[in-house]
Image: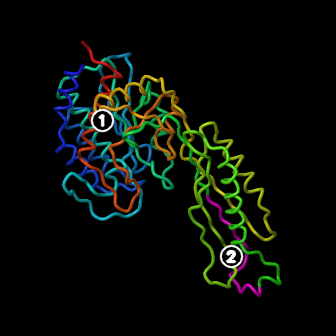
Amino acid sequence: MDDLLNRLFASISAEHLRDLTYEMVRIPSPTGDAEDVTAYYVQQLRALGLEVQVLNDFPRSPSTVTRLLGKPGGLTLTLDGHLDTIHTSHAAPYIEGDRIVGRGAGDMKSGIAAMVETARVLLENDVRLNGNLILATHSLHEAPVGHMQGLKALLARGDVFVDAALVTEGQCDALPIRGKGQALYECEITREGKALHENEARPLGIPNPLDYAVKLAGRMLEYNAAWAQKPDPLLGPETFFLGQIHSGDFYNRVPAKAFMNGVHRYWPDKSWEDVERMFNQLIASVEKPAGLQIDTKLFGNGLGYEVNPDEQIVSALRSAYQTVVGEALQLVGALSVSDVNVIAREGGIPVVAHGTGSTTAHADVEWVNVSDIVRSTQVYLATVITYLGVQG
């Protein structure tokens, strides 16, 4: 096994990983518009002689499935990733030394490049797996535009995520086995009429939508204070985060509308029905003055999850990491939502995540080091070999 892995590691091309990542980063793919970068990715796999199934379930957000069949009836491992990026603008991509800079470099086109390189190395070394390897990509990942529709459609097919999955995104020196779920909330508070001076509104009993928004935000802070008293050992407390409050256009005019949104992060023991029930109770706990209309929305972007640390894929990844890095892979909790949440809860299979070393997802300046992509590719190859085995 050591001889095989050494041969595979020696076949990894840092130049190829650099160029592939950079070219994908150069192709804009904000959520909902990943058609061009998907076409480029498909071209790279077909150049290796692989058949790629392109699924157009969503306009301009195609998904792909590529199969490296080794043994019918054997275990199947799926390498998974998304090709869309957040909509926030970024300076033009560039390469500086070992670093690739640009939107999507770390989140997560470098992980997709490592998937392609893993397939190339296995094929060019004529490795006959004792199981089956699937590469799966999709879009509509990044909220609030996407809500994991591409991934959920792949899960619904039933033959893409079969026995276990490895998401090529996330931490590279720790393995989350327990993660929070995420709900995005929006609340719009309106009243009839136009904005008017506060001294005219007060005698008429006209309510201020902003007053309600402030009270609701205060109640969320009360929830946070109560949850903080009972933190989870790996995840900390459940939380409400207030991202935006918009209202008003002048210091002494009563607005006709207020808007607020943010994120609720919750533990793995919650169902979506539990989250909805709690949120409705929260809204009901704040008295609504006569004359106000309250419209709320709650979007799910992945339930909380838990993976048994004794699962075979967990052991395979930890063994691979030990082989490549020479250290034990720490088991931790995950505060942010990823494909792991959806695969674990809706796919019902064991799943792990291992990224390419970038810590700049969604940052103003996003980057990844080529050397880290190489290291992650080594980990992926070792995980595939350990989990699936090779035919004698």
Q: Which residue is drawn at 62% across and 44% down?
A: 231
Q: Could you tell me if the residues under marks 2 and 1 are in contact, i.e. CB atoms within 8 Å? A: no
Q: Residue 361: give x, y in percent of width and height.
A: 39, 53
Marker count (numbered): 2
Instruction: State which tag comes first along the sequence, 2 or 1.
Output: 1
| Magenta stretch contains residue 196 | yes
Quadrant in which the C terminus appears = top left
Is disc 2 placed on a helix, strand or loop? loop
Q: Nearer the viewer, residue 8 or 117?
A: 8
User: How packed is label 2: few (under 14 Cα within 10 Å), some, or many (20 or more)?
Assistant: many
Which mark's residue is nearer the viewer, 2 or 1? 2
Q: Residues within 10 Å of mark 1 (few under 14, many from 20)?
A: some
Pointer 2 residue? 256
Between 279 and 353, the one lying in front of the other is: 353
User: Is 304 contained in the magenta span?
Assistant: no
| The magenta segment | 186-200
**186 displayed left or right of 143:** right
Look at mark 1 in the image and give the residue it sits on: 52
Please, what secondary structure does the residue beneath circle 1 have?
Answer: strand
Answer with left or right where residue 367 lies relative to residue 3: right
